[in-house]
Image: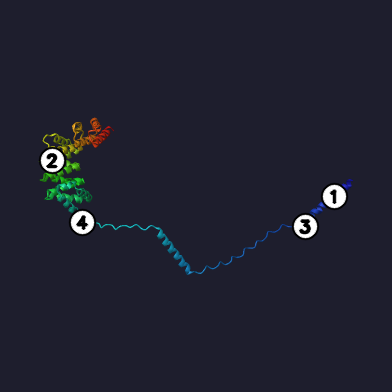
Amino acid sequence: MALAVLFAAAVGVVAGAIVGKSYRAYRPETAPKPVVAPPPPPANPPPPPAHDPEVDVLKRRIAELEAALAAKEAPPPPIVPPAPPIETEKAIAAKLAARFAALAEKGMGALGDPDFRDLAQDLKKAGAKAIEDLAKRLLTAESATERFLAGALMETMGDAAAIPYLSQALGKDEDLLVRRMTSHALAVIGTEPALGPLRAAMADDADWGVRVNSAYGVAKQGQADGLKLLEEAYSSTTTPAEYKLAVYGGLADVAAPTSAPIFRKVLAESTDLTYLFLSIRAVEKMKDAESVAGLNRIAGDAKYPANIREAAKKAAEAIAK
């Protein structure tokens, strides 16, 4: 039995060896990688198309149509009026001179004329040359009316460059109305160089109106001597009644706190609407607290016109702030 088993085992080993040898004898080798053939050379590109002149014609036509469409859609260009011709300085001066002459024909009444204000504004735009032209009229014109209007235009222009010419006229002009006008112009322009000529006229001029106008100009610049003369002119019994209101208006415009008792007295006693209005404006300007009671009384009294009551109420409220 044992021999049989061994024989069988040996046969199995020999058989296995034979099978293994046979497998090795018949096992195929590893397959080689396929050889990839190179791509064929590219075909020759087709030649470019021959130039066609009709294409150029069509392209130009398309461009023309697009431009025409854009022009149709765009808004029309604005119409710019031609610039007016530039006037020469000589032509401008001639026009202003003609307008001045037309005003002078109207006499003293030209002061309230709209043409007077328009001319003053245009002269102001003209600058230094206009001042020189007015100065020539103020200092050399034979007509007192022309000299008066020249001073009035200088006042309305408010240019301090006029002060030397106004000062000359104030010191030498023989016509008292021209001197009154020049003193008032210096007072309104109100710069420090005007103080000397105004003080001289305030002290020495023969005309009462020139002295008062000059005092007003000095007082406006905060000078006590001018205020003193202005207050004296108002309280004096020799001051003409028709001039007192003008003096009072000057005091109200200056609105010096030392003058407050004068305005309080008017608020308490006067029924004159112009005096009341000037007083209300003055105490409001100087913020006089002692006037508030009088202002409130006027504001609540139906005997006064509505505009006076409203002005008094507004002034009392402004002072109380």
User: Image quadrant of residue 301?
Assistant: top left
Q: Position of residue 254 (x, y in %)?
A: 20, 37
Checking the image for residue 54, the label placed there is none
The span from disc 2 to disc 1 (Cα, nearest Å) is 166 Å
Q: Position of residue 316 (x, y in %)?
A: 26, 33
Foreground label between 4 and 1: 4
Residue indicated by mark 4: 91
Q: Residue at x 19, y 54 (%)?
A: 95
Q: Residue at x 47, y 69 (%)?
A: 54
Secondary structure at badge 4 equals helix
Q: Residues within 10 Å of mark 3 (few under 14, many from 20)?
A: few
Relative to the observer, which residue lies in front, 257 or 204? Answer: 257
Q: Is residue 54 visible?
A: yes
Foreground label between 1 and 3: 3
Q: Position of residue 216 (x, y in %)?
A: 17, 39
Q: Earlier in the sequence, mark 4 or mark 3?
A: 3
Q: Earlier in the sequence, mark 4 or mark 2?
A: 4
Q: Is residue 255 visible?
A: no
Residue projecting furthest to the right: 1
Foreground label between 4 and 2: 2
Q: 37 left or right of 155?
A: right
Q: Residues within 10 Å of mark 4 (few under 14, many from 20)?
A: few
Secondary structure at badge 2 equals helix
The span from disc 4 to disc 2 (Cα, nearest Å) is 39 Å
Residue indicated by mark 1: 10
Quarter of the picture holding the C terminus: top left
Q: Earlier in the sequence, mark 1 or mark 3?
A: 1
Residue indicated by mark 3: 26
Q: Position of residue 112 (x, y in %)?
A: 18, 46
